[in-house]
Amino acid sequence: MLPDDTPFSGSGAVDCQTVITSRGVKLPDDPRYLSDRHRKLLKKNSYESKEADAALKAVKSSDIVMELGGGLGFMSSLISMNSKPASYHLFEANPALIPYIRAVHGLNGLQGIDVQNAMLGAKDAEAANFYVRHDFLASSMADDLGDANGGVARVEQVPVLAINAVMQRIKPSFLICDIEGAEASILPKADLSSLRAVLIELHPQTTGQSGIQAVFDVMHAHGLTYFPRASEGKVVLFKKDW
């Protein structure tokens, strides 16, 4: 959660004077974006550790990576620096995070990562509600989580892009998805035929058993099989090329 006296708007330049390094990725230690909990995890190399470990094992230099839910820009930086995929396309719904993500990429000398402020859905829409929570990395399209993650701080209007049109344009081979439960409604609507692997953080507390089943069903329908050696807990990897 951000300090009570720190308005998290994401406007203005990101403060890069102090830097935290985690797994070789440099991140600006800007209190508008990093809480004490984030700092501790980053300094211990424990931030998004399960997703990071799985991605570094699975992403190839030939991959076209598409990431839904860019967060702090940590995963996109880590993968781009180490696996060096052919291209990287990041979609983040929270507009306030876009300056920070770009600052992280710039601080690490990364160029060419495509960053878009958008949500993906069944069809294009001018805008949809996105609920920014006080623990902003838990922000999502869901408005019915009560006081979870500090409650809703504000509601943003975010453009919605048709997921199949995006998939057809990018033709990703590797999908990374951490969108706080929206995976259960978005992925079943998508044509995943171009993908050889999908890395997802599941959110059973939001989607319930039916949502988990929906994700596994759509993976199975596209020939993507659960890969236990790179999966742990809620972080699951599906692959075609075992």
Image (cartoon, rainbow, N blue to C red):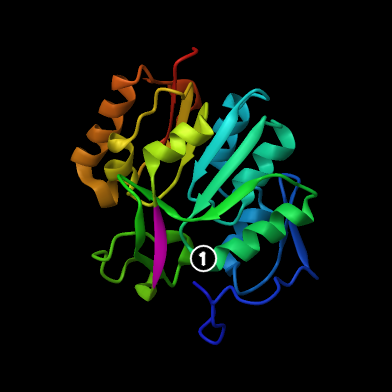
Q: Amino acid at mark 1?
A: Pro
Q: Nearer the viewer, residue 228 or 219?
A: 219
Rendering coords of residue 42 (x, y %): 65, 55
What's drawn in magenta, residue-wise? 156-160
Rendering coords of residue 12 (x, y %): 66, 77
Pointer 1: residues within 10 angstroms few (<14), some, or many (20+)?
some
Q: Nearer the viewer, residue 130 or 7?
A: 130
Residue 60 left/right relative to 210? right
Q: Nearer the viewer, residue 55 or 131?
A: 131
Residue at 80%, 49% (x, y): give it: 109
Provide the residue designation for mark 1.
95
Label 1 residue SS: helix
Rendering coords of residue 54 (x, y %): 55, 31
Q: Nearer the viewer, residue 16 or 191?
A: 191
Would residue 159 be counted in the magenta stretch?
yes
Would residue 74 be counted in the magenta stretch?
no
Can residue 104 be seen at all in this image of the molecule?
yes
Can residue 234 be seen at all in this image of the molecule?
no
Relative vertical location of residue 60 with respect to residue 9 in this rendering, above or below: above
Relative vertical location of residue 110 with respect to residue 61 in this rendering, above or below: below
Rendering coords of residue 194 (x, y %): 46, 23
Q: Quadrant of residue 152?
A: bottom left
Main secondary structure along the magenta-highlighted residues:
strand
Residue at 43%, 37% (x, y): give it: 200
Q: Quadrant of residue 219?
A: top left
Residue 196 left/right relative to 73? left
